[in-house]
Image (cartoon, grey):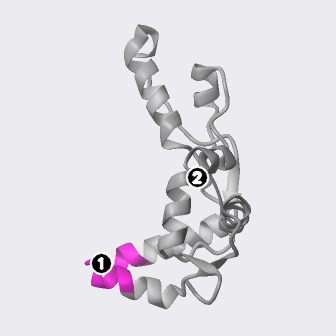
Amino acid sequence: MCGDELQLISAVTHDSVVTFIDVDDIALFAVKSIEESSMHNVIVTLTGSQAYSMSDCVKQLSHYLHKNIVYVREDPAVYARRLTQSGYTPQRITQQLETFDLWSQGECEVYSSDYYHYMGQATSSFSSYIKRNLSHLNMWSSQV
């Protein structure tokens, strides 16, 4: 917390846009894949139906929590130092940073309609995730 605003610090994601999939959607898919024999031995790729940037996510969190939340991108050098302290090899750190760079260029984004194909509906939106978890998020935002 900084003054009267919350700061959401994220790894070096630049302005990446990635799909969001709710863990509840994954759980629903898992249950169905166990219960329905037609889904046995099927390989799928589960992604969200919509992609969001960190800025999009922060705006939605600010709206639903009625708080000013500021998105702070972590400096690449700080991120690399943190990974080094966690035991990552220099090669792995370089690969991670290169992945973030590719994401910021719109590369490597995976989108699959497998969820919709098997479930007959789109995955939950980020805002529906926030609404469902609002009490937990409010607790988090009041403790920071």
Q: Is residue 115 left or right of residue 78?
A: right
Between 121 and 127, the one lying in front of the other is 127
Residue 134, label in figure: 2
Residue 144 percent across, percent down from the top left: 49, 76
87 in the magenta segment: yes
Crowd rating for badge 1 (residues with CA inside 10 Å; few <14, some 14–19, many 20+): few
Q: Is residue 30 left or right of residue 64?
A: left
Q: Is residue 28 left or right of residue 40?
A: right
Nearer to us of marks 2 and 1 is 2
Crowd rating for badge 2 (residues with CA inside 10 Å; few <14, some 14–19, many 20+): some
Residue 87 visible at all: yes
Mark 2 and mark 1 lie on one chain; the one further toward the N terminus is 1
Residue 60 percent across, percent down from the top left: 71, 60
Disc 1: which residue? 89
Please name the amino acid that badge 1 sits on: Thr
Please name the amino acid that badge 2 sits on: Leu
User: Is mark 2 in CB contact (under 8 Å) with mark 1?
Assistant: no
Placement of 65 over or under 13, stated as above or below:
above
Q: Is residue 87 left or right of residue 5?
A: left
Tell me which residue sits at (41%, 23%) in the image. Answer: 31
What kind of element bears circle 2? helix
Tell me which residue sits at (45%, 16%) in the image. Answer: 39
Residue 2 percent across, percent down from the top left: 59, 88
| Residue 72 location, quadrant | bottom right
